[in-house]
Image: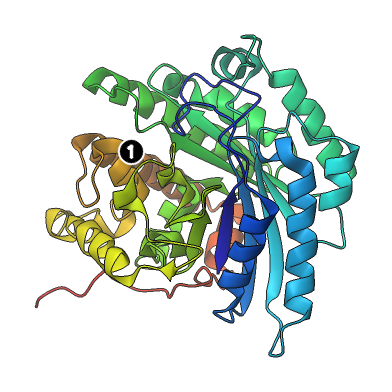
Amino acid sequence: MELTLFVDHQCNLRCRYCYTGDKFKRPMSAETMRTAVDLALQGAPDRFGVSFFGGEPLLHKALVRQTVEHTEAAVAALPTAKPEVQFFMNTNATLIDDEAIEIMAAPRRFTCFVSLDGSREVHDEYRVTAAGKGSFEQVLRGLERLSRAQIPYQLLAVYSPATAPKLGDTLSTLLSLNATKVHLAANFAADWTEESIQGLSAGLHAAGDVWIEHFRAGRVFAVEPFHAKILSHLKGGMPCPPRCLLGGCEWTITPQGHIYPCAQMVNEDTRADLRIGHIERGIDLAALLKMRQAKDRVEKTCAECELRDRCQSHCGCRHVALSGELGVITATLCEIEAAHIAEADRVAETLYAEGCESFIEYYYKRNWLPVRGGEMWEQRRAREP
C-alpha cells in the first residue's frame, strides 16, 4: 500500500510545463494527514509507503515531520503484524536544508525523487523560480546534501518536443550525479508533431549511446523506461504497476481530503469524476469500479498491437494527460512508446551481440522479480484463443 499525501498546491518554482495546475496555497492540515494515515492502515498492509507530493512538499517541513512521527507511532501501536514502512519525498530539491535532512536521515527509510531536467541550459530554461531564474544550482546543492547524508535519491528528467533531441546530453548529466536510478519522462501534455517525434527518436538514440558506453565501462545503471522495456522482452511481459490498478494499491489524498487513484490526476482537485472517495467516508466502490471499467476500454483499442505487452497504454494518468478521459489514448502515446521500445531493443541487441559482460550479468544472470503488488505475467489480460 502506498499513501501519497498531496501536501499543498503551492510551489516555490514555476516550471513552464507543470501539469498540476495553478500554484495556490491550500496546505494539508495535520488532522487530514492523521485521518488519511489511519484509514490506510486499516487495510493491514504488509508494506506501507508514505509519499509526499505537491506542489513542493518541503514548503511544509513541520507537517512532513508530523506525518513521519504519526506513521511510526500508528504502526507501532498496531495489534497485528507491523508492515514494513518506507517514505518517499517528491521534491525539486531546492529547499533541502539541515531540517529536511534530519527528518529524512537514517534509521528512517527515505528515498527522494528529484526533478532535474538535464544540463544547466535545459533545466534553467524550464524549471524556474517565481522570479524567472533558473534553479539548476539550487538543485545541485540539494543533491549534495542528500549525498552527504547518504539518503538515496532518483532523478526524473521531463522532456518536451523542444528538449527531446538533447536527451543524450540530459542522460550524461544525470548519470554523473550519483543517483540510484534515472527516469526519462515525456511531457504528454505538450504538442507532439510528426517532426517532434523524429526529434525524440534522435534524442533517444543519443541517450542509448550514452547508456551503452556506461555498460561497456562496467558501470551498471538502470535508466527508465529503457530498463522496463528490456525486461518486458526478456520476461515475456511485465506487470502493470500497482498504481495503474486505479486505487488498488495506491491512494492520493488532497488537502481537502479527496482520494484519487494517483497523484498525477489531482491537478487543482476539481475533477470529481477522477475521485475514488473521501477520507471521512472511505473508498467509493461504485466510483472506483466505474473508473476501472473506463480505463479498461483501452484493452480493446490495443488488442491487436504487437507492442501491447511492452507499452504503457494501460496507464490511466496518461490517458487523462493525453485525452482528458480514461480509456482513451492518442497516436502520441503510441509513437512515444514505440520510440522507447525501439531504442531499448537497439541497446540490448548491441550489447548482447558484443557479449558485454556487465549487461549480460545484469539482465540475464539475475533473478528478476515482479514489483511489489504485482505478478509477472505473459499477457496484460487473457486473450480469446
Secondary structure found at label 1: helix
Between 222 and 383, the one lying in front of the other is 383
Identity of the residue furthest to the left in this view: 385
Q: Residue furthest bottom?
A: 80
Q: How many residues crowd around disc 1 within 10 Å: few (fewer than 14), some, or many (20 or more)?
A: some
- Residue 161 position (above or below residue 322): above
In depth, the one of 314 and 283 nearer the eye is: 283
Tell me what residue is drawn at x 45 percent, y 53 percent.
Answer: 262
* Up-down relation of residue 147 to residue 368 (above or below): above
The quadrant of the rendering that contains the N terminus is: bottom right
Q: Residue 98's quadrant in the figure? A: top right
> On screen, 193 above or below 228?
above
Q: State the image coordinates of residue 296 (x, y, percent, origin top left).
A: 22, 61
Question: x%, y% of residue 55?
Answer: 58, 35
Q: To which quarter of the image does residue 182 belong?
A: top right
What amino acid type is highlighted by mark number 1? Answer: Ala
Residue where numbered disc 1 is placed: 321
Judging depth in this view, the residue of 307 and 101 nearest the camera is: 101
- Image quarter (top left, top right, bottom left or bottom right) of the C terminus: bottom left
125 vs 264, left or right, is right
Indicate the position of residue 297 as horizontal and vertical percent values. 17, 58
Residue at image point 20% right, 75% down: 382
